[in-house]
Image: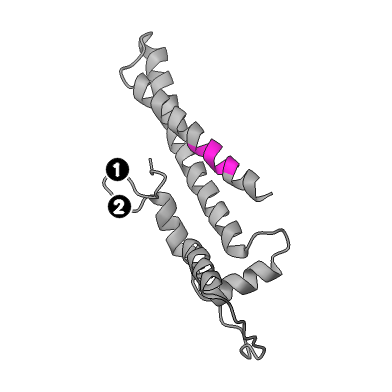
Amino acid sequence: MDGSDGLDHAGRPGAGERARRSVVRQRRANVAGGRRGGHRVLVTLDEEEQLARLAAAQGVTVPRLLVESALAQRGETATQRRDALVELLAVRRLLTAVSVNVNQVAAKANATSRMPAETAGALSAVRRLVARIDDVLDQLDSRV
């Protein structure tokens, strides 16, 4: 299972991080005819640092952050919604894998009338997944 940093136990990008990277684009997509309008925004050094930090955290450019934030309908940017969707899909994949594992343990227990050695590992995986689901729900709840 992925750690909270998006890396697996070997330090490689986990499934959620790989999925997020596959759909992340820093710049906005090109549009037919280009973009004719432009705005110049002057900010203080502190504001520039904050904008740069926020943009880096979302994996977008500062101009994209400003446009998405200003035009966001629900107080979150399209990038934040996409990241939440990617995380939910990663959790769904993990839930499927853990469910298969639990079903295999149950089938073995039913066939032998004994609890298999894998039971503790399967239950531990369920607990970790429930904690991750709780984290995702808390993140989504904080945005509402």
Q: Which residue is mark 2?
A: 12
Q: CA distance from mark 2 to mark 1?
A: 7 Å
Residue sitting farthest toward the right? 73
Tell me the residue at 39%/22% (across/down).
105
In this picture, is 130 found above or below 118? below
Which is nearer the eye, 70 or 3? 70
Q: At which x and y percent is residue 35?
A: 63, 88
Residue 137 position by quadrant: top right
Which is nearer the eye, 112 or 59? 59
Residue sitting farthest toward the top? 113
Check contact, mark 2 vs mark 1: CB within 8 A.
Answer: no
Q: Which residues are magenta?
A: 132-138
Tell me the residue at 61%/89% (across/down).
34
The amino acid at mark 2 is Arg
- In reply to whether residue 5 is colored magenta, the answer given is no
Classify mark 1: helix, strand or loop: loop
Residue sitting farthest toward the left? 10
**Label 2: few (<14), some or many (≥20) within 10 Å?**
few
**Label 1: few (<14), some or many (≥20) within 10 Å?**
few
Q: Which residue is mark 1?
A: 9
Tell me the residue at 26%/46% (across/down).
10
Which is nearer the eye, 48 or 123? 48
What number is the disc on residue 40? none
- Does the image show residue 24? no
